[in-house]
Image (spheres, rainbow, N blue to C red):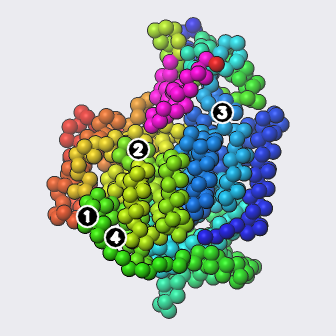
């Protein structure tokens, strides 16, 4: 894993000291709230509905055990004993007190972590495939590039006041697990005809108020050209992006209004200029990053323990089916730890659970953990022979839920239980859906299904790319939920289609049940997934099922 | 009460804890909505907001919110968002609903 350079260390410590002084000045009255607010936001501190919220960056979703243990310590010492892992691969603490925040930031700096650029109109934390460096389908680990982007974008003087926030996602694999097409910039590693790895550069994707699938600007960009090309994109955006209307300020609107070919031409023109002056990062730095993310020394000892455990233990077999993915080393597996127990809050982990995860990573996982945008934790490198022991420990800690990729593996934003921007709650909806389908015992029969819930139009819960998406709104003073169907966040990215009028909370669960029942009725074979069936038949039969009794539907 | 005037109270968040607070008649703040002073005219709302804005050193984001008056004559939220603010999140017993000792403190 990457370790902070002296520069990083000094920079982060200085920012903590600055923020400590800013908090003191806010408290002694030297700073008004209007002056203080942008300063606290630059350090990840939001004021939410009931309390402050601190958003801590987890660069490209990668953590080691020491960092995870420190998050547990922070949760216990300054919060309420838990943390919330987010769809941006970050962690949020929901109850910090203003006076404690400088101490929390100091504790984060002790383990090379911070909350910088987790808010504001700058380049946010770069997200990456949570299976990076482990996945069998990967061309290369994208994290050396992700770390280079972190260093490049941190405090980049030209890009601190963009028209709006800017999110970059990166994957090294053809199967897109990082939703690259719904980011301001998505980078997908591809090979050119000569077999060299480079990046497909996708620009102008995004969810929120105006969901868009990103447009490919370059089919193949050599790795060496990445930074000047990204600077060209950012420069075109910085100069041409709309600042007159917050809702039209993201680069997706610029791309859409300008046209793909036109914007590509502008970028290429800026790129030629940029390249003239661009100073490539020193070779030693790039090599250092490659080395920092070099694969661990794998233990290739063959063992039958994994196969035996699956024969002997049906629960373990079931866990393996859903929660263990293929590793590039056949003696290893990638273990996804579900933070979605039935009835629980998606993405939440208690401090005890964090410590268990840290211990398992240290003992069995080459000291690596990942946060996924689907709000789960990944142990990317576990020897197959150790997976039975890992499973037993997870189960003991309430982390053994075998539901990755299934109906109850729901993404949900914090919604109006916490968020000041929300228009309705998300968490109770996720809980009710999971509980209801647990009663029906249909989850395995239904198969792969992604339900994603957002509590407002900003779409932190990625509802547009959910196979079933749910959007919570305030409909004349009552929580109301719109359904979209057929969304897809992978390499075949698609924005879901709205079914029609929304539903009151009590009518929503029956509507979801009707949608699932329709799918079970129309699928041509057991292995035709919900998304495949939807693509075959379209929205009509689902609409017919949920609006058959029009009196139940509330006009949207 | 002036005709057509919807009664209002002043709410904000505490600077230090972030907790939801309500302006009382004496110009100090309560954690419990029941203690909020009810403004019965637009002029009174203005006066109370001025009192609130004068306390920027300990509060954040003051605004007037419309309320209903319950059977006991106490203010009650007229929107679910404000109702959640009186209580805390629904997924855990945290926030105001748990910190009963703070209520009225």
* Image quarter of the C terminus of chain B: top right
Quadrant of residue A433 in the image? Answer: top left
A448 to the left or right of A35: left
Answer yes or no: are tags 1 and 4 on the same subunit: yes
Look at the image and give the residue range highlighted in magenta: B76-104
Q: Position of residue A30 (x, y in %)?
A: 83, 37
Residue A121 appears left or right of A258: right
Residue that label 3 marks: B17
Q: Position of residue A366 (x, y in %)?
A: 53, 70
Q: Nearer the viewer, mark 2 or mark 4?
A: 4
Q: Helix, strand, or loop for circle 1?
A: helix
In the image shown, does A531 or A129 lie closer to the viewer?
A129
The answer to whether the residue labelled 1 contacts the one labelled 4, judged by CB atoms less than 8 Å apart, is: no
User: For this rendering, which residue is in front, B47 or A154?
Assistant: A154
Tag 4 residue: A306
Tell me the SS state at disc 3. Answer: loop
Residue shown at 49%/78% (left/top)?
Answer: A298
Taking A200 as reference, is A284 left or right?
right
> Badge 4, how many Cα within 10 Å: few under 14, some, many 20+?
many
Disc 2, disc 3: CB below 8 Å?
no
């Amino acid at each position: 894993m990457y370790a902070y350079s002296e520069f990083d260390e000094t920079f982060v410590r200085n920012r903590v000291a600055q923020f400590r002084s800013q908090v003191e000045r806010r408290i002694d009255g030297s700073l008004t709230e209007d002056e203080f607010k942008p300063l606290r936001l630059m350090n990840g501190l939001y004021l939410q509905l009931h309390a402050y919220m601190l958003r801590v960056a987890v660069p490209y979703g990668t953590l080691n055990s020491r960092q995870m243990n420190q998050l547990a310590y922070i949760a216990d010492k300054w919060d309420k004993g838990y943390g919330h892992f987010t769809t941006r691969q970050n962690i949020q603490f929901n109850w910090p007190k203003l006076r404690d925040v400088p101490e929390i930031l100091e504790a984060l700096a002790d383990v090379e972590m911070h909350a910088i650029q987790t808010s504001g109109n700058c380049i946010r934390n770069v997200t990456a495939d949570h299976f990076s460096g482990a996945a069998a389908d990967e061309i290369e680990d994208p994290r050396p590039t992700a770390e280079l982007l972190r260093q490049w974008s941190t405090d980049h003087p030209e890009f601190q006041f963009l028209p709006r926030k800017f999110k970059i996602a990166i994957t090294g694999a053809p199967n897109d697990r990082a939703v690259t097409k719904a980011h301001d910039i998505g980078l997908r590693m591809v090979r050119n005809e000569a077999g060299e790895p480079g990046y497909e550069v996708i620009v102008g994707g995004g969810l929120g108020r105006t969901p868009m699938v990103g447009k490919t600007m370059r089919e193949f960009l050599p790795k060496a050209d990445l930074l000047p090309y990204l600077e060209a994109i950012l420069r075109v955006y910085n100069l041409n992006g709309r600042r007159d209307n917050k809702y039209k300020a993201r680069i997706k609107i610029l791309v859409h209004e300008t046209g793909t070919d036109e914007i590509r031409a502008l970028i290429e023109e800026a790129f030629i200029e940029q390249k003239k002056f661009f100073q490539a990062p020193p070779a030693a730095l790039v090599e250092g990053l490659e080395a920092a993310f070099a694969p661990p020394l794998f233990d290739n000892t063959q063992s039958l323990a994994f196969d035996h455990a699956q024969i002997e233990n049906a629960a373990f077999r079931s866990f393996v089916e859903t929660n263990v993915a293929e590793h590039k080393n056949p003696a290893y597996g990638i273990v996804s730890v579900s933070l979605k127990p039935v009835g629980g809050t998606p993405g939440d982990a208690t401090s005890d659970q964090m410590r268990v995860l840290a211990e398992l990573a240290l003992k069995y996982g080459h000291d690596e953990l990942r946060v996924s945008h689907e709000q789960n934790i990944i142990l990317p490198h576990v020897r197959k022979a150790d997976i039975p022991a890992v499973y037993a420990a997870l189960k003991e800690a309430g982390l053994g839920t075998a539901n990755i990729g299934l109906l109850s593996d729901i993404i949900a934003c914090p919604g109006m239980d916490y968020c000041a921007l929300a228009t309705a709650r998300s968490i109770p909806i996720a809980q009710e859906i999971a509980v209801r389908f647990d009663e029906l015992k249909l989850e395995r029969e239904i198969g792969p299904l992604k339900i994603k819930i957002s509590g407002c139009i900003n779409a932190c819960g990625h509802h547009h790319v959910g196979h079933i998406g749910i959007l919570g709104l305030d409909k004349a003073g009552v929580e109301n939920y719109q359904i979209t169907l057929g969304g897809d966040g992978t390499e075949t990215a698609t924005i879901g289609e709205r079914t029609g009028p929304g539903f009151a909370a009590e009518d929503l669960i029956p509507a979801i049940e009707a949608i699932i029942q329709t799918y079970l009725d129309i699928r041509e074979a057991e292995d035709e997934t919900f998304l495949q069936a939807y693509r075959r038949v379209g929205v009509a039969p689902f609409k017919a099922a949920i609006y058959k009794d029009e009196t139940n539907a509330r006009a949207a | 009460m002036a005709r057509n005037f919807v009664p209002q109270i002043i709410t904000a968040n505490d600077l230090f804890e972030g907790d939801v607070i309500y302006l009382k008649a004496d110009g100090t703040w309560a954690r419990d909505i029941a203690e909020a002073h009810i403004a019965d005219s637009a002029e009174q709302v203005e006066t109370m907001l001025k009192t609130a804005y004068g306390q920027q050193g300990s509060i954040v984001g003051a605004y007037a919110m419309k309320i209903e008056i319950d059977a006991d004559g106490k203010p009650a939220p007229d929107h679910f968002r404000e109702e959640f603010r009186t209580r805390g999140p629904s997924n855990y017993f945290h926030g105001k609903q748990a910190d009963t000792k703070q209520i009225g403190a």
